[in-house]
């Protein structure tokens, strides 16, 4: 068996088969062309090159894991079944539908196919989370003031009192006219970190008479502030439950396969490092969830 060793991503080589035919393997894939589809159960990553010869390289990961939610690198050892790589050439250009359509495509025709025999796929994810709550916080910090499982930098209710942090800072602080956020009871702890905002010994979360997980709309005296900001009113309705939290998330990925071995009959291609590519905004949206109460 003859071995062709590929060291560079954009290296093009060819070799003659025993019967004199020529097999050409280009691997001219732009890193920015990486795309993906699917989800838990079966993720598909693919890179298409239609510039000279219609060709593609793809990776299927059959896993129940929910990917792209946390930063880090996950390693997958190729086995040809649940973690499988496929390199193909076609007789015509291909589109994303070739990999992502619910109905398997019948065209274009595959002219050359190499299957991944071994290798290690490394999926690196970089995640950015932002609660947009008006507080600049260090994304490297592990601080979780209310121990709800959401770190402060993407927790839009840092103290877990069911009043969003943004609503506890004050308009002057948000406008940049005041150095310090609101501290209603003047105890030195700003309201957004204070579980008893009015200092009446009743937790803010408990000053929710109607039990709708929103203390801001509960007024014993409508001429005053809400009960949770009125020290003279100390009604308690024990509520040990958090309201729905939301944060913005953006995920970028890079996919690399090390020590990739592709086979087609007696032909074997070994590529020390194959960069399938990178993609920005694999996830770009809002996650909403209700933290578990501890």
Image: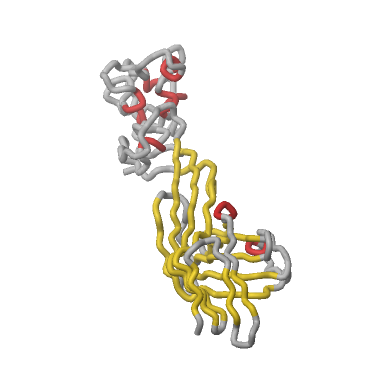
Instruction: Give the quadrant of the C terminus.
Output: top left
Counting from the top left corner in percent of width and height, residue 112 is at 64, 75
* Residue 220 appears anywhere in the view: no
Q: Left or right? Give the position of 115 relative to 293.
A: right
Q: In this view, does 184 lie to the left or right of 7?
A: left
Picture coordinates of residue 137, whole percent (x, y)? 37, 32
Place of residue 13 in the rendered image (x, y in percent of width and height, measured from the top left): 57, 70
User: Which is more toward the observer, 40 or 89?
Assistant: 89
Q: Which of 238 and 30 is in front in this view?
A: 30
Q: In which quarter of the image is residue 26?
A: bottom right
156 lies above or below 197: below
Q: Nearer the viewer, residue 130 or 217?
A: 130
Q: Which residue is drawn at 59% across and 70% down?
A: 25
Taking the view exactly as shown, the residue that stands out farthest to the bottom is 19
The relative height of residue 263 versus residue 180 in the rendered view (above or below) is below
Q: Residue at x 61, y 65 (%)?
A: 56
Q: Residue at x 42, y 49 (%)?
A: 70
Can the viewer see residue 168? yes
Q: Say if 269 sits above or below 281 in the image.
A: below
Residue 33: quarter of image:
bottom right
* Residue 113 percent across, percent down from the top left: 61, 75
């Amino acid at each position: 068996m003859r071995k062709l060793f590929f060291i560079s991503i954009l290296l093009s080589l060819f070799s003659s088969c025993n019967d004199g035919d020529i097999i050409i393997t280009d691997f001219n894939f732009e890193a920015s062309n990486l795309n993906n589809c699917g989800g838990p159960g079966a993720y598909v990553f693919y890179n298409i090159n239609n510039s000279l010869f219609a060709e593609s390289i793809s990776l299927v990961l059959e896993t129940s894991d929910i990917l792209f939610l946390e930063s880090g690198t996950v390693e997958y050892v190729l086995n040809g079944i649940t973690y499988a790589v496929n390199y193909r050439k076609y007789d015509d250009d291909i589109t994303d539908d070739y990999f992502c359509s619910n109905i398997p495509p019948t065209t274009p025709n595959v002219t050359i196919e190499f299957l991944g025999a071994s290798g290690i796929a490394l999926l690196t994810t970089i995640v950015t989370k932002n609660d947009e709550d008006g507080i600049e916080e260090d994304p490297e910090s592990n601080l979780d003031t209310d121990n709800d499982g959401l770190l402060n930098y993407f927790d839009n209710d840092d103290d877990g009192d069911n009043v969003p942090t943004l609503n506890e800072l004050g308009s002057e602080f948000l406008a940049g006219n005041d150095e310090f956020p609101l501290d209603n009871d003047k105890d030195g702890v700003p309201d957004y970190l204070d579980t008893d905002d009015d200092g009446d010994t009743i937790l803010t979360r408990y000053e929710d008479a109607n039990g709708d997980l929103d203390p801001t709309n509960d007024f014993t005296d409508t001429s005053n502030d809400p009960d949770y900001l009125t020290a003279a009113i100390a009604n308690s309705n024990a509520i040990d439950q958090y309201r729905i939290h939301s944060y913005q998330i953006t995920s970028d990925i890079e996919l690399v396969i090390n020590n990739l071995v592709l086979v087609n009959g007696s032909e074997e291609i070994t590529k020390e490092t194959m960069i399938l590519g990178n993609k920005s905004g694999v996830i770009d949206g809002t996650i909403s969830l209700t933290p578990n109460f501890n």
